[in-house]
Amino acid sequence: MDREEAWALLNEYTQKDGLLKHALEVEAGMRAYAERYGENADVWGIVGLLHDFDYERYPTEEDHPFRGAEILKEKGLPQDWIDAILGHADYTGVPRETRMAKALYAVDELTGLIHAAALVRPSKKIEEVEVKSIRKKMKDKAFAANVSRADIENGAKDLGLELDDHIAVVLNAMKGIAGDIGL
């Protein structure tokens, strides 16, 4: 599956603008990590783009991302792509054994926190967001309360990175697509 096919599949299952933007943000973060680790950025990007493609239709823990994994398997996607997508949610019980799977888990929640931090800026521009402001927002439990701080911290740890370094990678990736995500 190439990026164009992945984008079409995402749009077939997802209509909400916020979920489409989230997919683009995770894709950007995954591409950044692939480049950092010398991996295939196109593959990692597609995995990021598709990780929640089934969520709007199947939002329960009983269904997401399991239904999506079945669809992706039917479409012939490689098992390591599917395993990474299954592993991005702790409740699936699928271990994150590859660097790609660990990166997806690490990037997913962080993009939500960064996006929210940009939206509370007077300009609503991500270019004004800094790592230190993300760290400050992480301490405020009421801010973006649905974003798991533990997942962000554990994701950085699983990648062997300091939290500030992890935030910087994802923040810079998101800055690179600011126009596409409305920030």
Image (cartoon, helix red, strand yellow):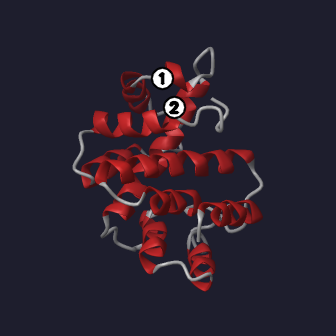
Secondary structure of the residue carrying numbered label 1: loop
Q: Which numbered circle lies on residue 144?
A: none
Residue appearing at x 53%, y 28% in the figure: 117
- Asked whether the beta carbons under mark 2 and mark 1 sit within 8 Å of each other, the answer is yes
Between 148 and 81, the residue placed more toward the observer is 81
- Rendered image quadrant of residue 75: bottom right
| Residue picked out by circle 2 | 175
Kindly identify the amino acid type of the residue bearing the numbered disc 1.
Answer: Val
- Real-space CA distance between mark 2 and mark 1, rounded to the nearest whole angstrom: 9 Å
Of the image marks 2 and 1, the number of the one nearer the N terminus: 1
- Rendered image quadrant of residue 179: top right
Residue appearing at x 57%, y 37% in the figure: 177
Secondary structure of the residue carrying numbered label 2: helix
| Residue picked out by circle 1 | 129
| Image coordinates for residue 88, horizontal then vertical, percent | 45, 62
Q: Is 119 on the left-hand or right-hand side of 139?
A: right
Q: Is 14 on the left-hand or right-hand side of 112?
A: right
| Image coordinates for residue 158, horizontal then vertical, percent | 26, 55
The answer to whether any part of residue 54 appears in the image is no
